[in-house]
Amino acid sequence: MGVIENNQEDTIYDVLRSDILDLKLRPGMIFSIKDISESYEVGRTPVRDALISLSKEGLITFLPQRGTMISKIDYDKVRNERFLRICVEENVMLEFMAVCNLKAITALEMSLDRQEQLKKTKDIRAFRAEDMYFHSIFYEGANKGYCNDILAANSGHYRRIQMLAMADSGIEPGVVKQHREMVDAILAKDSEQLHGVLNHHLNRLISKERPLVSKYPELFDRENKEIRREPDELGIDFLVDTKLKYHA
C-alpha cells in the first residue's frame, strides 16, 4: 500500500481501488476511516469521499456500528460482469477488425512480446495489467474507449476472481497463445475464428471459479455469513501475506 503525497480525493480513490482490485486488501477486511487515513497518510475527508465512491461500485460495504468492509467477492456479480464484457467485447473487436491499422497492430504485437516476458517472471499483477492494456487497444482502435471505461467501472468482482485464480494456480500457459490467435483472426478478417477464440478466452475460468469459492469461502459473499478470523493489518499485502503464488 502506497502513501498518498497529497489530499486529493481522486488520488486516494485510485490507490484504494487499485489495492482492492489487486487483492492487496482482503475481501471481507473490516477497517475504519481512521485506519485508512493513518495507513495511507491522507486526511479523513478525502478518505470518506473515496469510500463513498467505491461503495457505489460495490467494492466497499458500510457496516452500521462495525466500520467499513472491503466487499467480499459476489459470484452472481462475477457472472453478470463477465456476461456484460462478452456481449460488448465481441462487437468491439469486429469493429476493430474493419478499421485496424498498422499502428494498432504494432501495439498489439509489442504487448504480446511483453506478455511473453512477464509470463516468465510470474508477476501476476504486472501480467494482468498488460493483459488489460492488450484488450484496451481494441476499444481505442474502434473508438470505443468510453465502453471500456464503463466496463472497467463495473467489473470489480470479475477482476478480483481473475486475480485470485492467477494467485492460486499461476498464469495460464495458453493465455498468450489465445491473444495471438485473436490478432491472427483479425489480420485474416476471419470473424468466425475470432468468435470462437474470444468466446473460449473470456469463458476459460468458469470451470475454476466454483472450486475457488469452496477453497476460499471467507473471500466470497455467501448468504452474508461472516467467517471469524484475526483482523488484518493495513500495510500488509494480502496475496503476499497468505503466500499465494504472487511473486513481487
Image (cartoon, rainbow, N blue to C red):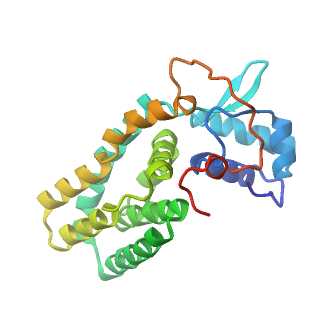
Q: Is residue 59 left or right of residue 109?
A: right
Q: Residue at x 43, y 54 (%)?
A: 148
Considering depth in this image, is 239 or 72 the residue closer to the camera?
239
Q: Position of residue 93 (x, y in %)?
A: 27, 60
Q: Kindly tell me whether residue 68 is visible in this rendering.
A: yes
- The residue furthest front is 243
State the residue at coordinates (73%, 49%).
236
- Left/right placement of residue 130 relative to residue 233 reads left
Quarter placement of the C terminus: bottom right
Foreground: 119 or 203? Answer: 119
Q: Picture coordinates of residue 168 (x, y %)?
A: 48, 48
Number of marks? 0
Q: Position of residue 74 (x, y in %)?
A: 49, 30
- Which quadrant is the N terminus positioned in? bottom right
Residue 96 can be seen in this image: no
Closer-to-camera residue (109/10): 109
Residue 13: x and y in percent read 69, 48
